[in-house]
Amino acid sequence: MKKILIVIFIFSIISFFLFSETINWNIFFEDLINKSIAGEKIKIENKSQEFNLYAEKTKWIPRISFDFPKLIEWQKLNTKINMLNSSYSFKLNQLLPSNGNISFISSINSNYILGLNKFKHTPSFSLQFEQPITNTAFNFINEANKIKTYKEEIKNQKAKEKFNFIKNFLIEFINLQIISIEAEHTDAEYLYAVENDNIAKEKYKNGSIKKSKLLETRQNEILKKQDFNLKENELELTKYNFFSNYNYEFYSLNKENKDSLLLFLEEKIKDFKDIDINSLNHQNFLLKLEKENVKLKNAPKFIITGSLYPDDTKNKFTQSYKSSWDVLNLKNDIWIPAISVGFYWQPDYLLLNKKQIDILNLKINKLDKEIEILKSKNRKNRLLKEKRIKSLKKDLTVLNETLEEQNLILKDFEELYKKNEITKLKLLEANSYYKSQKLLYIKKYREIIISLLKL
């Protein structure tokens, strides 16, 4: 518990200096993302997106595989002769942007007759080209567009995650500002009610008011105390949750930082204006890819294979291990070349793929319409948003001017109270008016923040 209090105290000191001085909001949010739990979630999401791009890029690197179906096999040829066999192969596969692939396969079977000390090796080599036949089979440009689209989506996702983080943080932060000022306001009202109750008690003793009036002031004081305690508890709980989510201690913003935050959002929001449209475009792109993959399932495949293997009539057992390899010298006429052309097709006679493509077409058309509607809606909303923010700023200016005037009046009341020219009740009443005006101002400020965060 002691350690936790020390940590909170340290963050309180840091936060105090940050919020009492001018904040660079770009640096502020970058630091906050780096150290908060919500920021860690963003990092995980960004890494996942980067992995998808990496997987897409590296699929063009040839894949190597090794196969050892028979490391060693014992075979009894007859009652006296036994033979050991082994078999293994090596495969190099290269995907092509045309959705086809080229494979190089090298395999070897080795035989050793026990007792007779006879050896034989049977290697083979083949090069195979396989190509599905579709209307986009040789669309090499599409693959370049795919990489470009993945990169754009990563950039868009990062922007979206950052925007959501800033949005959630600021809404919670400004709400906490409001709760804090509400606590100040309920405190001011409670102090006013306490002083009013004290005056009522004196008047009741002097017989200038009835007991019913005293009970009314007492009842009001109890209710104001309840409001104050409940608001204080709400503030402490909200602060704790805020600290847990963002690893940041709450402090009130000064006037300069409030103004700089509005300027920051007005400028920064331009970077996020099309993130929803970009996300829909990427979804549309993925659906089109899925559609192409469905077409490939039952597309006819054209296969060309070239191979080289030894003639069994010339590749015979030899008396030594070395000579068994010498026989297979490529200069010898033991090798037989071969080439074959093949065709493979599994027709979609149940029309399963066609039905799946029809569904995907409906989804693609739906997304196309959504994108057009969203573009039109965004254009209208931006015009309305500009007018609304302009109007809210005027309101905020009026409220701020009144707040400053109320602050000056409160200071005058404090001077009058020091000179015993007014009662404490009058001073507390002026303080309550000031806190009430402060609350109106911060609520209007929240309206502007929320309006700016609406894309």
Image (spheres, rainbow, N blue to C red):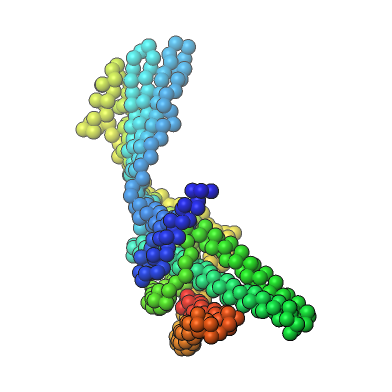
Instruction: Please give the count of numbered marks on the rendered protein.
Output: 0
Out of 59 and 454, give the one closest to the viewer: 454
**214 on left or right of 391:** right
Residue lying at 36% horizontally and 25% vertically, measured from the top left? 110
Q: Nearer the viewer, residue 278 or 112?
A: 278
Q: Position of residue 80 (x, y in %)?
A: 44, 11
Instruction: Locate residue 105, reporting x and y percent.
Output: 35, 40
* Up/down of 207 relative to 36, above or below: below
Q: Tell me if I can see residue 419 in this picture.
A: yes
For this orientation, the residue located farthest to the left is 331
Residue at 64% across / 67% down in the picture? 230
Where residue 308 appears, as percent x and y from the top left, is: 31, 38
Let me know if residue 270 appears in the view.
no
- Residue drawn at x 30%, y 27% is 314
Q: Classify residue 92 by image quadrant.
A: top left
On the image, which quarter does residue 351 sit in?
A: bottom right
User: Residue 33 placed where, x, y %?
Assistant: 42, 60
Q: Nearer the viewer, residue 372 or 289?
A: 372
Q: Nearer the viewer, residue 92 or 255?
A: 255
